[in-house]
Amino acid sequence: MTTLLEFREKVKLIYSRNEAYIQPVLKFLLAFIILNAINGQMGYMTVLDNLAVVLVAALTCSFLPVGGILFFATVFSVLHMYALSLEVALVGICIFLLMYLLYFRFSPKDSLVVVLTPLLFVFKIPYVMPVAMGLLGSPASAVSVSCGVVIYFLIAAVAGNATTISTLGSEEAAGKIRLLIDGILGNKQMVVMVAAFAITVVVVYLIRRMSVDHSWTIAMMAGAMADLVILLLGDLLYDTNISVAGAILGAVIAVAAGKIIEFFRFCVDYTRTEKVQFEDDEYYYYVKAVPKMTVTAQTKTVKKINTQRQGSGRSVTTEWTGSSRNTTSAPRSRSGYNGPYSERRSGGRSVTINSNMTGDTQDAGDDYEELF
Amino acid sequence: MLNEERIILMTKMASYEENEGKKNMSIGKYFRSDYLSIQVLKAVISATVAFAIMLALFVFYDFEVFMQDIYKMDLITFAKNVLFCYVATVAVYGGIAYGVCSYRYSKAKKSLKCYYHNLKKLNSLYNE
């Protein structure tokens, strides 16, 4: 466990140090994967189904806010629909507009969820999303996840009916619209998925907020079970042809993903729980305090490099900070003089270079410090 | 001489101003009634556009049948039904928007109260 905690601290440290570079790279990768997935699913407009165009769009997304990915994904989807048929594009625009007008005006932060949900459907692990959002989000995230499910089924409906739509002539505009709307609203699998995911988000959220030990673990397991039960019930009632083995495997993966999220977000030590009770003029307080599990990440500190003008030359002291491990690769300076700015810093690598005069005079002007 | 307490407080406040505070301050500059009126008005406009989109989809879904029936149907009753659905949509969405914005306003005000308290504390630290 200590190794894992150390690893977590290292990851956090690396992320916090390089956040300015890591975030654009992650956004670029996410946009690249999503736009490629859209091209793979639809790909009717050959101009867009081009690596150079995807790369340019992904690069643009890398310095835009996360909502930029949703915008580009929407544009790509609508353009592909337009290449298939104008009517299909109109239906697509209407559905995206309805989502924006009725929900995303209130919750622009959840745009990532709407983009990730269809992507996870493509990777065959959509069950991760409701559990993750129940752990990290609020009950309102149920709407975001549901919007993501609807978008996936919209794209699936377009891809599924593409052959039929392309054979219909321009005089059959109403028929195309009807075909697509029926493909979405008449899809029982989508309705069952929306219901299952929305209920899962709420169940996970409610349980993980409870004041019981291991609430996060209980929440994710209960959520995965609820998801599974609703999907199987939906399959029995509406014959949605959901793969039972896939759903069970998905639930297991959802719990595993939930444990990873828990490790990074809510790693506490229940064995050291403290319960205290006190009062003031107005209230009695029953407080349960659960300490977080933390260790300080090991960082290599090169403490001193002493250049001696007369005598043996340079001595370097290397030490590990932040844990019980402590390695000294060279003897410490014997002079005892650390210079005016030498101090030990935790969580970073510091090098202090002193010029020690063994004679009568000390040149304080040679003392300087370099921090990395 | 550096005052550690003052620096910590200033850092916390700067972080708040950069992130959560930006949104809260934009909410906090309104009176409650003004803020809610603007937000509900926006919601009504959004709901109107959304309803128009849904109505257009409904009409185009069965356009040929609709065009055949338009001469036979009672247009006044049809218009009344559409109007009723519109009012219901706007009322429900406006109500939800009112609830959400009311909650957000009270949350922002509470948060800003804490921020102003810290501002006063910082001022007193400077006067020490």
Image (cartoon, helix red, strand yellow):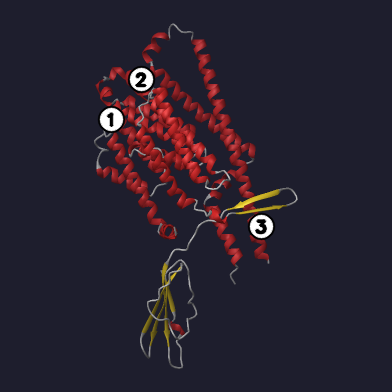
**Image vertical order of residue A91 relative to residue A341, above or below:** above
Q: Secondary structure at mark 1?
A: helix
Q: Amino acid at mark 1?
A: Ala
Say if residue B95 shows up in the picture: yes
**Same chain letter for marks 2 and 3:** no
**Can residue B29 be seen in the rendering of this structure?**
no
Indicate the position of residue A333 as horizontal and vertical percent values: 43, 83
Q: Residues within 10 Å of mark 2 (few under 14, many from 20)?
A: many
Q: Which residue is mark 1?
A: A83
Q: In the visual, does B128 lie left or right of B73?
A: right
Closer to the camera in the image, B43 or A130: A130
According to the picture, the residue beneath numbered tag 3 turns out to be B120
N-term mark: 2 or 1: 1
Q: Secondary structure at mark 2?
A: helix
Q: Chain of mark 2?
A: A
- Residue occupying image coordinates x 37% and y 50%: A26
Q: CA distance from mark 2 to mark 3?
A: 63 Å
Check the residue under mark 3 and report the chain it is in: B
Residue furthest to the bottom = A360
In the displayed structure, A334 sits above or below B84; it is below
Question: Identity of the amino acid at label 2?
Answer: Arg
**Disc 1 from disc 3: Cα separation:** 61 Å
- Which residue was labeled with disc 2? A178
Provide residue B79's location: percent of width, then percent of height.
Answer: 51, 14
**Contact? badges 2 and 1 (CB < 8 Å):** no
